[in-house]
Amino acid sequence: MVEFEKRQVATLHGWHRSFCLRMVAGRASLNNPGRMLALQRGSHTQGVVLKLPEATLEEELGLREMVLGSYQPTWAPVTLDDGTETHAIAFVADESREKFEADSCVETVAPLISAASGKFGSNTEYLLKLHEALSECSVEDRYIAELANAVYRLSRVATCDVTGTSE
C-alpha cells in the first residue's frame, strides 16, 4: 500500500491506459506470459492522482514503479475534478524496451490475460481489481471495461464442459 497525503480524481491529458507491457513473472510466467498496464501517448484518461509525502517520494516511486525499468516517468498535464489544472508524474510505457508490445487491442490482450498466472496470482485478478478500483472512484475507462468483459467471457468458455453447461 502506498502512503499518500491527498487523493483526487483527475483527467490525464495526452495519454491513455494500455496493457502494452509483456509480463513473464509475478502474475504471469514464461510459459503463460501476461500483460502489465502502462500509459501510451494519445487521447486522455481519468484516474486518481496522489500527493505523496516528500520524505518517501523517491523511495515509493522507485520501488513501486521503476523496479522493472519498463516505464518512463513523465510530467503530464492533469485537470483535477475540482477544475484545477496542474501536472503529475505519469508512468508511461518505454517503447524502446524489449517488453513493450505495440498491439494492445482487446482481441489480442484478453486471451493472454485470461491464461496468465504466477506466484502473485492471476493476471485476470490484476485486471479485475483495476476495473473495480476505477468503478469505486466513479471512473469509467472503456478499454478497461471491454477488456474485463472479454476476459470474463473467456473464463466462462473455459469453465464449460463438453456438453456446453457450466461446471
Image: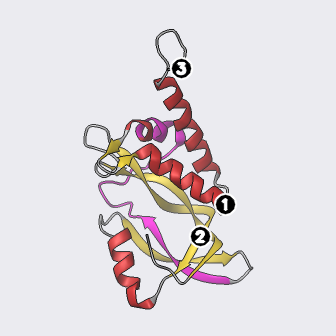
Residue 48 is labelled as 2
Where does the N terminus fall, quadrant-wise? bottom left
Distance between the alpha carbons at the discs numbered 3 and 1: 32 Å
Q: Secondary structure at mark 1?
A: loop
Q: Secondary structure at mark 2?
A: strand
Distance between the alpha carbons at the discs numbered 2 and 3: 37 Å
Q: Position of residue 7 (x, y in %)?
A: 59, 77
Does residue 117 appear to the left or right of 124 in the view shown? left
Up/down of 9 relative to 27, above or below: below
Find residue 98 and report its image quarter: bottom left
**Residue for badge 3:** 166
Residue displayed at 43% across by 52% down: 20
Does residue 89 appear to the left or right of 77 in the view shown? left
* Badge 2 or badge 3: first in the primary sequence: 2
Q: Is residue 156 visible?
A: yes
Q: Are marks 2 and 3 in contact (CB under 8 Å)?
A: no
Q: Amino acid at mark 1?
A: Val
Q: Amino acid at mark 2?
A: Val
Between 8 and 69, which is closer to the camera in this rendering?
Answer: 8
Q: Amino acid at mark 3?
A: Ser
* Badge 3 or badge 1: first in the primary sequence: 1
Mark 1 burial class by Cα count in 10 Å: few <14, some 14-19, many 20+: some
Residue 92 is labelled as none
Distance between the alpha carbons at the discs numbered 1 and 2: 9 Å
Q: Residue furthest left?
A: 30
Q: Position of residue 46 (x, y in %)?
A: 64, 65
Q: Are marks 1 and 2 in contact (CB under 8 Å)?
A: yes
Mark 3 burial class by Cα count in 10 Å: few <14, some 14-19, many 20+: few
**Residue for badge 1:** 139
Q: Residue furthest right?
A: 83
Q: Secondary structure at mark 3?
A: loop
